[in-house]
Image (cartoon, rainbow, N blue to C red):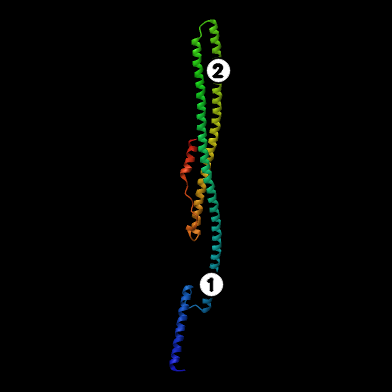
Amino acid sequence: MSQAQQDLQLKVWKELAISKQVLMRVATDALKLDPECTQEELKEALETALKKVAKADTELVSAKKEAAAAIAALEKKLAEGEQELAIAQKAAAEAKAACDLAVQQVANQRAAAATDLQKVKDRLAEREVALKAINTALADTPANVLKKMNALKKQKQAEADARRQVESALNTLRTEKRQQDQRLADLLRNSATLVGRYRDLHALSLKLHEQLQPLVGDAKSLPEIPELDTSLLEAIEQPAEKK
């Protein structure tokens, strides 16, 4: 072997030795060991570090599985909440429509009762006019007095019959009004309860949506929660509060 080859080989061994020392120093620094530690100590520290890495990988996999299960559960709750929210919105709209219909029915019944009462009053007025004409036409003879008494008796009987008809109509109207008012009060009370549940359900949906955002990769992929229809809710709540 020539001198040049020996020098080259010596140079290579020196560089390998230096590289080994550098690697050893990096490893001991990373593992927080004494740079003068033995190879056995270094080996044990490396094995311990590898075990920690393996344990961390296992825990990471387990954590990912638990997070996936939690996300699936929250997504299921959110879907159920959205379904209940849609049902509540439909029920609220139906309750408002029923409330409007009940108010219109009460107004129609009152108008019809007022019309019937006016008809009875008109009939009484016509009979009074006819009676006055009869009294004027009749003389004051005994026969005429008897006729007047009979006519007056018939008039009083007719007036009594008319009053009974009016009272009967008014009693029927009062009964129907009380029943209608009770139905309307029950409807408004149920509507107010439904509005409260609707608000609670909307708040729960928003809370579930916020809990899901940090658990998914893309928060925008979550379905949006529809805004609360405050005008509809207030339209239902205000009649209930006045009641």
Crowdedness near tag 1: few (<14), some (14–19) or many (≥20) residues, C-alpha within 10 Å: few
Q: Nearer the viewer, residue 203 or 164?
A: 164
Picture layout, residue 133 above or below residue 104: above
Which residue is located at x 55 percent, y 34 percent?
182
Position of residue 7 in the picture relative to residue 51 (left or right): left
Q: Position of residue 33 (x, y in %)?
A: 48, 74
Amino acid type assigned to the residue bearing label 1 in the image: Leu
Residue extending furthest toward the front: 137
Vertical position of residue 243 compared to residue 164: above or below: below
Residue 238 x %, y %: 47, 39
On residue 50, which mark appears? 1
Image location (x, y in percent) of residue 4 = 43, 92
Q: Identify the residue at horizontal 51%, vertical 12% (top origin).
A: 134
* Image disc number at residue 158: 2
Local crowd at mark 2 within 10 Å, few (<14), some, or many (≥20)? some
* In this view, 130 is above or below 228: above
Count of labels in the image: 2
Q: Secondary structure under badge 2?
A: helix
Pick out the residue farthest to the top: 141
Outermost bottom residue: 2
The reply to whether callout 2 and callout 1 are in contact (CB within 8 Å) is: no
Q: Nearer the viewer, mark 2 or mark 1?
A: 2
User: Looking at the image, is 95 positioned above or below residue 110?
Assistant: below
- Image point 52% across, 31% down: which residue? 109
Q: Which residue does the image show at 52% across and 26% down from the upper left?
A: 116
Query: How far apart in space, not on screen, are marks 2 and 1 (Cα)?
Result: 113 Å
Q: Amino acid at mark 2?
A: Ala
Helix, strand or loop for disc 1: helix
Q: Earlier in the sequence, mark 2 or mark 1?
A: 1
Image mark for residue 189: none
The image position of residue 130, as x and y in percent, is 50, 15
